[in-house]
Amino acid sequence: MALEAYASRNPDTVHADVLSKARQACYKARDAFYACLDKESNKRPTEIASVGLLYPSECKNSRAEFDKHCRASWVKHFDRQYCRNRRVQRLLDDKDSRRGPLMLPQPYTFKSS
């Protein structure tokens, strides 16, 4: 309600410094959380984040900061993006180890009887 009153008072003014500072705080918290995930990747994940992302309990404080500084929709988006990037990187890293012989379909020819 207070936001609506403020917005109606200055409909054409966008306070970019407030938006910018909020985004920078969100990005900083996001980077700290994902850095913790990368650093603690060898530990067993015990906590559940959005979109099924699992993380170790050592990163619980940085996750709380991430949730505090970012909108819920942004957190969900960043979690999906992180999971997708990890999946792609894992597929690219395992490409040579999973590669088998190349089998092309053989052309089928009809034989007349």
Image (cartoon, rainbow, N blue to C red):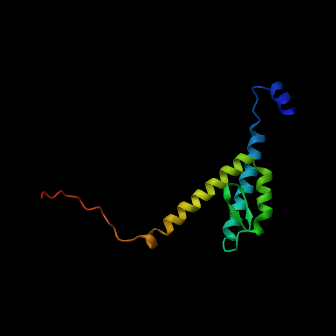
Report the residue at 32% width, 66% height from top. Answer: 103
The x and y percentages for residue 83 are 61, 58
Judge by depth and name the residue closer to the eye, 3 or 96: 96
**Side (left or right) of 9 relative to 111:** right
The x and y percentages for residue 26 are 74, 51
Report the residue at 80% width, 58% height from top. Answer: 64
Q: Residue furthest right?
A: 2
Q: Quadrant of the C terminus?
A: bottom left
The x and y percentages for residue 70 are 75, 49
Q: In this picture, is 9 found above or below 18?
A: above
Q: Quadrant of the N terminus?
A: top right
Judge by depth and name the residue closer to the eye, 81 or 30: 81
Quarter-of-image position of residue 18: top right
Judge by depth and name the residue closer to the eye, 100 or 33: 100
Report the residue at 49% width, 65% height from top. Answer: 92
Report the residue at 66% width, 52% height from top. Answer: 78
Quarter-of-image position of residue 97: bottom left
